[in-house]
Amino acid sequence: MQKFDVLIIGSGLAGQSAALRLAPHCRVALISKRNLEDSASGWAQGGIAAVLDSQDSIEAHIRDTLVAGAWLNDEEATRFVVENGRRVIEWLIDQGVPFTKDAAGYHLTREGGHSARRVIHVADATGLAVQDTLTQKVRNNPNITVLEHHIAIDLITGDKLGKADKRCFGAYVLNNRTGEIITVGAPNTLIATGGAGKVYLYTTNPDTSTGDGIAMAYRAGCRVANMEFIQFHPTCLYHPQAKSFLISEAVRGEGGLLRLADGTRFMPEHDERAELAPRDIVARAIDFGMKKRGLDCVFLDISHKGEEFIRSHFPNIHARCLELGIDITRDPIPVVPAAHYTCGGIVSDLKGRTDLEGLYVAGEASCTGLHGANRLASNSLLECLVFAEAAVSDILGGKAMDIPELPLWDESRVTDADEEVVISHNWDELRRFMWDYVGIVRTTKRLKRAKHRIRLLMREIDEFYANFRVSHDLIELRNLVFTADLIVRCAMQRKESRGLHFSRDYPEISSKAKSTVVRRRLPARPA
C-alpha cells in the first residue's frame, strides 16, 4: 500500500494543473495511463476561451455559452467559469505557456458559436504547447510522484471497507508494465480521466479516452448526468492513413467554407450563421448531406485565404495534410464528423466535489453544468483549469485525516485469461453498434437495440472480469461498456431533441426539459 495526501487519476490539463497547485503544500500521486504527454488535452488545437479583450464582456461569453448549450446549462456554474477565465489564463502565462502574439498583444481568434474574438491560442496546437509546458514542471517537482503506464481499476470506498461513511479512500491501480496491482490510499482523490470518445467507432480522441473515471465513479455510487450529449466534431480529416486527426474549429472561424465535392456550399441552408454555427448544427448538417447523397465525406476549403495566412495560422494542420498529399493552400480538406467530447459526466458542485466525500472531479469526466446540451468551442480547457483550481482550494482548506490500512487486491480466485480474443471482439462490436445506433441522429428503436446489445455484453464482460486476472484492455472494455450503458440510458430518458441529442421520434424542444441523471443503487449494508 502506498499513501499520499492527494491521488490524481488522469494526467491531462486538469490533472497536471491540479498537481502543480497542490505540490507546494502536500504529497501528490499522479496516475497516467501512458506517458504524461498522452492525453486529450494535448490534442486540443483551437485554444482556450476567455474574456481578454476590452471589446468583449463576461455577459457576452455567458450568453454564447448558454445559447450553444441550448439553455440547459447551469447559469451559476457558467458564470463561475467565465468570471475566473482571465485569472487561470494568467496562471498559464506565469507557467511559461508561449501563447501566440500579434502587434496588439496576445492574438485572439474566433470560433463557431462565439460572438467575439476571445480564444487565446498557440498557433493551431494549443493543447500540445500547454501540456508540454506543464509536463516539464510536473516531472521536475519532488512532491509529485508520477506513475506512468498505470491504470486505475476501481475506487476504494467506505462500502467496500464495510464502513457506513460514504467516502473515497483511494484506488486500486494496475501497473501495466509489471502486471502488479497496487493499493493507493489518499484522503482526497481527484478524477481527471477525460471523456469517452473511444466508445464510438470514429473519434478525434486519443486511445486513452475510455470513460474510466465516469465508470468508476458510477460504480462507487456517484450521480452521472447528461451522458446523451456526445459532441461530434464536424471536421475530422477523412483519409485512410490518418487516425483521428482533427481539423480545428478555428479553420472555420478564420473563414473556412464547407462544400460538397462539386464546390457547392451547404451550411447557409441549415443555419443563418453558416460555418460559424455551433458544432451540433454543423455536424448534423454534414451528416444529413452525406446520407442524403451517399457521400463518404464533405470538404472544408480555406485555400482562398492564401498561402501566407494558412501557413502562419495553421502550420500543424498544413504540415500534416501535406504529408498525406493534401495541400490546403490549394485544395479543400476532406472531412467527416467524429465523436469528440463528452458533455455529461460525474455530477459535481462548484468546488469539484462529487457525491462521495473525498472524491473530486475536474475536466471532461465531470458534469458541472457549464456545457448544457452542447459545449461551446474552446470552453473545455477553460473548465479544466477553473475546476482544478476550485478542487485544489477545497482540498487545501479541508481538515487533515489519516487513511486506515486498506485491503490489498485479491487475486486468489482468478486465473490467466484463456482467450484474449473475447476482449478485442467485444470492443469492436461495442464501438460499431454505438456508432450505428447511438450516433448523431437517434431513434427510440435504435436506442432499444443498443440497450439490448449492451446488456448481453455486460454479462459476458462481468463473467470474464470475475474469473480472470485483470489487464489494461479488460479494464478499459469494462469501463467502456458501463459508459455506453449510461449514454443509452440518458438518451432514452430525454423525450425531446436538444443540443447534441437529436431524436427522430421527439424532434421538438420540450419546455420542461431538465438534466438526465442516473445513479447506481448500491446494495444496503446489513444492520
Image: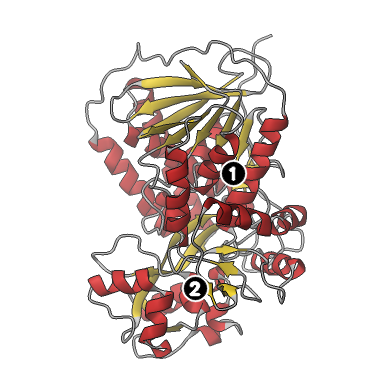
Q: Position of residue 460 (x, y in %)?
A: 36, 32
Q: Residue at x 67, y 55 (%)?
A: 87
Q: Amino acid at mark 2?
A: Ala
Q: Position of residue 236 (x, y in %)?
A: 39, 67
Q: Is residue 463 above or below residue 38?
A: above
Q: Position of residue 490 (x, y in %)?
A: 59, 49
Nearer to me, 48 or 421: 48
Nearer to me, 5 or 486: 5
Q: Amino acid at mark 1?
A: Ala
Q: Position of residue 231 (x, y in %)?
A: 52, 60
The C terminus - image quarter: top right
Q: Is residue 126 above or below residue 411?
A: below
Q: Is residue 383 left or right of residue 419?
A: right
Image quadrant where residue 222 sits: top right
SS for callout 1: loop
Q: Residue at x 47, y 30 (%)?
A: 142
Circle 1 Cα neighbour tier, 10 Å, few/some/many (<14 / 14–19 / ≥20)? many
Q: Residue at x 27, y 36 (%)?
A: 422
Q: CA distance from mark 2 to mark 1?
A: 25 Å
Question: Mark 2 highlights which residue?
Answer: 250
Question: Mark 1 highlights which residue?
Answer: 362
